[in-house]
Image (cartoon, helix red, strand yellow):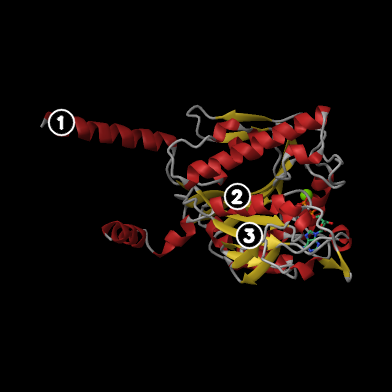
């Protein structure tokens, strides 16, 4: 098949590094919670091996017994016995720890940050699926954000030949408004685009310098308490905001300055607004969250299909993450799911979304500037090149 050969030679031309161009997708199944343990639920996600799972496994009727008592089927739609096989870069079962998830995922992109690449880690999933547990964690089980900073600082300590400055910012997109979670009293933040419409900055967002990992967990926890959280009917711990934690690195080595950014995003719940029973202002929140998540989904689809036009402009979240999704970026998606049949639809939708994300092929380039050249020097270079061009055209 000539098409296959072409594909193969193309990927080998990209070199050994080309595997990084793909978005890495992980699925984490959290343990049953107390509510799920006491309802007549069944387990609908079976982790088969390191990289695959079966969703909605085929089961015999006797498995619907609960505490020895046969259960009447309450929701036949949740007992489809579809036996669907899903494959991801890695799958983490109920016993997995934040440390294990970190080591298999984010730890592997740390060195890219020092090479000047933008990186991003998304936690996706329905409310209660384990996104915040994975990203922020608890003091006993610190999450990916903390473990990443520890690793970054370790890397900096060992690299004698570079000077690195790290800063952190933490913002929230809630109801299509952007708020600084580290300085919650500050006004709503606006997005600024540079003249060419390429680079987007969050005007007024404060960046705090980081020197120690210890201060970071307290900082993140405080920021997290400032998130706009409202209890809804479906879950008291519902979070309707997107939290974006960013580490900004400035690396100086061999007279070169590299600027890179690591974004860690705890997305709002992916469940459909209709399922949460929201009305009025909550309903508006719901539709805005859908707007940002929908836009993210549309960007993922466009990137997965290799389309020229990616609709980043459609929401605040996708505008902020324009340089952190596809493009100049290495991306990790951690899809969080509940194992219980009571979350059947949410889990199925999350697995489908995660599968779609696997198809993104990013093209990456480094953010490198040459410190030794100034703007007047560049202008002089341009003049010289123009003169040469005139000379060539004239002769
Ligand atoms: P989300 O942020 O997706 O809404 P949370 O991370 O807040 O969900 O998780 C909901 C609840 O389940 C929390 O009480 C959390 O501590 C618990 N939980 C989630 N994932 C795990 C896990 N892997 N191990 C233990 N507890 C978990
Ligand atoms: Mg949360």
- Residue 118 visible, this orientation: no
Q: Of the residues tagged 3 and 2, which is closer to the observer?
A: 3
Classed neighbour count for the residue bearing mark 2: other residues with Cα under 10 Å, few (<14), some (14–19), many (≥20):
some
Furthest residue in direction left, as rendered: 395
Q: Is residue 353 above or below residue 34?
A: above
| Residue 173 location, quadrant | top right
Q: Nearer the viewer, mark 1 or mark 2?
A: 2
Q: CA distance from mark 3 to mark 1?
A: 69 Å
Instruction: Identify which residue, 127 or 219, lies in the foreground.
Output: 127
Where residue 26 appears, as percent x and y from the top left, is: 61, 60
Residue located beneath label 3 in the image = 82
User: Can you tell which quarter of the image residue 217 is in?
Assistant: bottom right
- Nearer to me, 327 or 75: 75
Mark 3 vs 2, N-terminal side: 3
Marks 1 and 2, the one that precedes in the sequence = 2
The quarter of the image holding the N terminus is bottom left
Badge 1 crowding class, 10 Å Cα cut-off, few under 14, some 14 to 19, many 20 or more, is few
Q: Locate residue 145, reporting x and y percent.
A: 71, 56
Q: Residue 255: image x %, image y %?
A: 47, 53
User: Distance of mark 1 from mark 2, alpha carbons?
Assistant: 54 Å
Which residue bears the numbered disc 1? 393
Q: Secondary structure at mark 3?
A: loop
97 relative to 388 in the view: left or right: right
Helix, strand or loop for disc 2: helix
């Amino acid at each position: 098949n000539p098409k296959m050969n072409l594909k193969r030679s193309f990927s080998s031309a990209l070199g050994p590094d080309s595997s990084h161009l793909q978005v890495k997708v992980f699925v984490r199944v959290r343990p049953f919670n107390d509510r799920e343990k006491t309802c007549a639920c069944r387990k609908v996600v079976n982790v088969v091996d390191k990289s695959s799972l079966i969703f909605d496994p085929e089961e015999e009727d006797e498995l619907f017994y609960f505490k020895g008592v046969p259960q009447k089927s309450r929701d036949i739609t949740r007992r489809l016995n579809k036996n669907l096989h899903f494959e991801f870069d890695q799958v983490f079962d109920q016993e997995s720890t934040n440390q294990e998830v970190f080591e298999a995922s984010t730890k592997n992109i740390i060195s890219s940050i020092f090479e000047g690449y933008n990186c991003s880690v998304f936690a996706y999933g329905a409310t209660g699926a384990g996104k915040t547990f994975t990203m922020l964690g608890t003091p006993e089980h610190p999450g990916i954000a903390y473990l990443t900073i520890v690793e970054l600082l370790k890397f900096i300590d060992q690299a004698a030949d570079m000077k690195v400055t790290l800063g952190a910012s933490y913002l929230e997109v809630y109801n299509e408004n952007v708020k600084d979670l580290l300085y919650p009293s500050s006004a709503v933040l606006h997005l600024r685009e540079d003249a060419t419409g390429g680079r987007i900055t969050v005007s007024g967002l404060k960046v705090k310098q980081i020197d120690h990992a210890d201060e970071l967990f307290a900082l993140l926890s405080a920021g997290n308490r400032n998130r706009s959280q409202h209890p809804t009917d479906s879950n008291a711990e519902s979070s309707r905001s997107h939290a974006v934690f960013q580490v900004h690195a400035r690396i100086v080595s061999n007279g070169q300055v590299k600027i890179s950014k690591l974004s860690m995003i705890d997305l709002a719940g992916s469940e459909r607004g209709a399922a949460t029973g929201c009305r009025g202002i909550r309903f508006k929140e719901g539709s805005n969250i859908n707007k940002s998540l929908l836009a993210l989904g549309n960007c993922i689809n466009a990137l997965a299909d290799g389309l020229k036009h990616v609709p980043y402009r459609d929401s605040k979240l996708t505008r902020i993450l324009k340089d952190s999704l596809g493009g100049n970026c290495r991306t990790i998606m951690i899809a969080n799911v509940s194992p219980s049949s009571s979350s059947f639809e949410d889990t199925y939708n999350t697995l489908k979304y995660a599968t779609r994300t696997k198809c993104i092929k990013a093209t990456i380039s480094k953010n490198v500037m040459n410190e030794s050249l100034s703007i007047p020097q560049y202008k002089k270079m341009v003049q010289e090149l123009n003169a040469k061009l005139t000379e060539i055209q004239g002769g």
